[in-house]
Image (tube, helix red, strand yellow):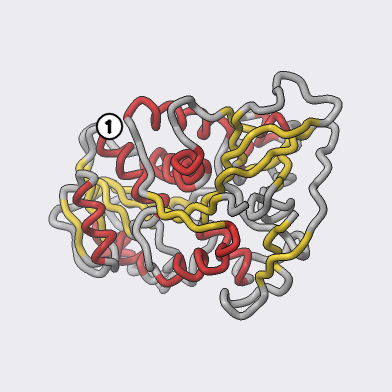
Amino acid sequence: MRAWSVVTAGPVGTGGLRRLDRPVPVPAEDELLVRVRACGVCRTDLHVAEGDLPVHRPGVVPGHEVAGVVAGAGAAVRGFAAGDRVGVAWLRRTDGTCAYCARGAENLCPASRYTGWDADGGYARYTTVPAAFAHRLPPGLDDVAAAPLLCAGIIGYRALRRVSLPPGGRLGLYGFGGSAHLCAQVAIAEGARVHVLTRGAAARRLALELGAASARDVREAPPEPLDGAILFAPVGDLVPVALRALDRGGVLSVAGIHLSDIPPLRYESELFYEKELRSVTSNTRKDAREFLALAVRHGVRATTHTYPMARADQALADLKAGAFDGAAVLVEDG
């Protein structure tokens, strides 16, 4: 099969990400073999390809927003049949026995493993996933619509819950790509007033179309103090900007797996009055189940731009350049 491989981590477009011939993977006894029908393009894939994240698996196949069908299974798998629609997300495996797993915080498991980083992902015709970490896709969501929900949607949902927004609260979203535009839909459906701060004019237009109360440049102040904010852009310089926009007792949640260095913070203007700064680490399977149910209930839909699998490198370059609003999705190309 044809698959994209991070041969040498480096800037996209320089040849480090290559499409090669690879054997069809063989599922382990507890795994499913999944035929990839669609795979979302996540900023984490860009971090893996460019080396912002350390190499975990040399030559890894990126991609962890996979919508596909079961094409085979290991001997120990029960409850899945060939042709079942499943999603493959970022969190691939945990030990299930550590203190974090025992208290329901499997996203903090020290032995956690990730699709498209520790194991080959969805920029290919086939991938594998432990059956216990496969997500059944809701009926009524086609593959392209479902793919971005499996990381961008889930992580945005966890970041929203980390904000602890009060009912009817004022929420700021810094950056408005694949994850933020899904998070915004959930927040608005739950009664929040959402203010979007982002550099792209197309992204600001999309925010207003989705029901945001305002959309401004990322360096501008929102029109009112915020009860909570989420930083989606991987730009550490924006942390003090967002903290200054918070009202007393407000919470800033940082959603990304990678963030450039945060400049020194001024206690009086940026942290005083019991403001909080929180990070987000991966997600739990419970997060995924809750979010997928909410997405169906509230009609959450990704704004998608499809690319053939053969142009995955271009999709990542366009993501880096901010060339599209919403999310990019790779689809089968024969």
Q: Residue at x 25, y 38 (%)?
A: 188
Say which of 267 and 309 sits in front: 309
Residue 141: x and y, percent? Answer: 45, 32
For residue 156, side relative to residue 229 (left or right): right
Residue 247 shows in this picture: no
Nearer the observer, 19 or 272: 19
Residue 62 picture location, percent across and down: 65, 57
Residue found at the very far bottom of the displayed protein: 14
Q: Is residue 182 above or below residue 289?
A: below
Up/down of 102 relative to 229, above or below: above
Residue 161 locus on image (x, y percent): 40, 38
Quadrant housing the N terminus: bottom right
Is 5 displayed left or right of 63 in the figure?
A: right
Instruction: Please determine whether, in this image, residue 242 is positioned above or below residue 301.
Output: below
Pick the residue in front: 286 or 76: 76
Under circle 1, the secondary element is loop
Number of labels in the image equals 1
Q: Classify residue 127 by image quadrant.
A: top right
Residue 29: x percent and y percent? Answer: 85, 32
What is the crowding at mark 1: few (fewer than 14 residues within 10 Å), some, or many (at least 20)?
few
Residue drawn at 84 percent across, 37 percent down: 28
Residue that numbered label 1 is attached to: 190
**Residue at the extreme top:** 79
Question: Residue 83's image quarter?
Answer: top right
Task: Locate residue 164: give its quadrant.
Answer: top left
- At 35% across and 25% down in the image, what residue appears? 297
The three-letter amino acid code for the residue at tag 1 is: Glu
Image height of 277 relative to 55, above or below: above
